[in-house]
Amino acid sequence: MSASTSTFPPVGRRRRISDTGDRIFAALCTAAGGFVLVLLGAIIVTLFIGALPAFERFGVAFIWGTTWNPVEGREEFGAGVSIVGTLVSSLLAIIFAVPIAFGIAFFLTELAPGWLKRPIGTAIELLAAVPSIIYGMWGLFVLVPFVQKNIQLALGEQLAALPLVGFLFESTNFAGTSLFSASLVLAIMILPFIAATMRDVFDQVPAVYKESAYGLGATRWEVMTGVVIPYTRVSVVGGIMLGLGRALGETMAVTFVIGNANRIATSLFDSTTTIASVIAMEFPESLAGSLQQSALFAIGFLLFVISFAVLAISRWLLRPRLK
């Protein structure tokens, strides 16, 4: 076929068409990235503007203030109790969830027979799909009575008698809704995210690394701690931070089981509250433009700051280190 009858456009025209497509694609991707920044900035500005009256009224003391009185004429607000409740419940949830998640991931990648891996993996993914309000209902009607009867009432006195840590179990609250119950529910909720992440990254370790360690006489545990975990450290910590972020912002499940009492818990069995639960309980009833609504915006802004700080710390921990 001669050049004059070819159905293909000239080379120069094809290059122009290709350049135009590349520029359009690059512009769309840049716009998508910029949209994320704009959206994030809009959220921060909205929260800060809404919180400004509360910050102007109470100043920096709002952060550690422990009084929360929405009664009109006596309005006084402080975020200290909800901040402590948010941090402690989330950290306890991580302490409870991470060892179990590691055990699940270790079992699925190193010990489980082939026919069992898929059902357990599917069950983990299904746990992640359960709505949070279902976890809250289950926690209120199943977990809270179990904790009350089989842990607090059955073991409370013995645990309170332990040296050094006994004060953590001393409580006069026998309703069952407590910091401990909320932490257990949060741990169950974040468990599938952490376990699924660990399982996936453990599977990505090149087989030759593990086979070499086994060839040198290493045990399964030595291979896991000496080869797999160092190789997947960044991803494992990322999965844990994903779970921590979910725990920090969880609302309905915690609202059901934490007791929603505006006091700092001195015992694991005391009732307390979190930032998310305070907002969920009071925001629908707050008047537009009121000081109470501004205080709710303020604690929402502080929750955003806490989440950002957690992300920054995780980035710092995972930074490349010069040897």
Image (spheres, helix red, strand yellow):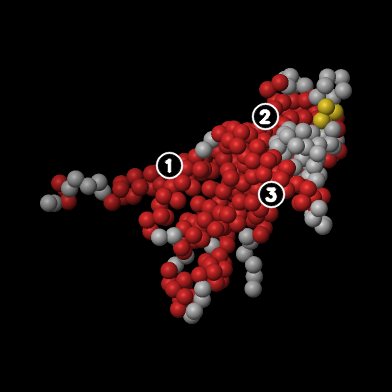
Q: Residue at x 43, y 44 (%)?
A: 25
- Please say if the residues under marks 1 and 3 sit with CB atoms less than 8 Å apart: no
For disc 1, the neighbor class at 10 Å (few under 14, some 14 to 19, many from 20) is: few
Q: Which residue is mark 1?
A: 24
**Seen in the image, is 311 located left or right of residue 272?**
left
Type of residue at label 1?
Answer: Ile
Amino acid identity at mark 2: Ala
Specify which label sits upstream in the sequence, 2 or 1.
1
Pick the front one: 207 or 92: 92
* Mark 2, other Cα within 10 Å: few <14 / some 14–19 / many ≥20: some
Select label 2 or label 1 by which is in front: 2
Name the front one of labels 3 and 2.
3
Q: Residues within 10 Å of mark 3 (few under 14, many from 20)?
A: some
Q: Residue at x 84, y 33 (%)?
A: 67
What residue is shown with label 2?
280
* Spot occupied by residue 302 in the image (x, y as percentages of width and height): 73, 39
What amino acid does circle 3 point to? Leu
Outermost front residue = 154
192 vs 41, nearest the viewer: 192
Q: Which residue is mark 3?
A: 92
| Distance between the alpha carbons at the discs numbered 2 and 1 | 43 Å
Alpha carbon separation for disc pair 1 and 3: 48 Å
Q: Quadrant of residue 40?
A: top right
x, y percent for residue 280: 67, 29
Q: Are marks 2 and 1 in contact (CB under 8 Å)?
A: no
Which badge, 3 or 2, comes first in the chain's sequence?
3
Which quadrant of the figure contains the C terminus?
bottom right
- Residue 182 appears in the picture as rendered: no
Task: Choose between 51 and 67: the one closer to the eye.
Answer: 67
Occupied quadrant, residue 262 = top right
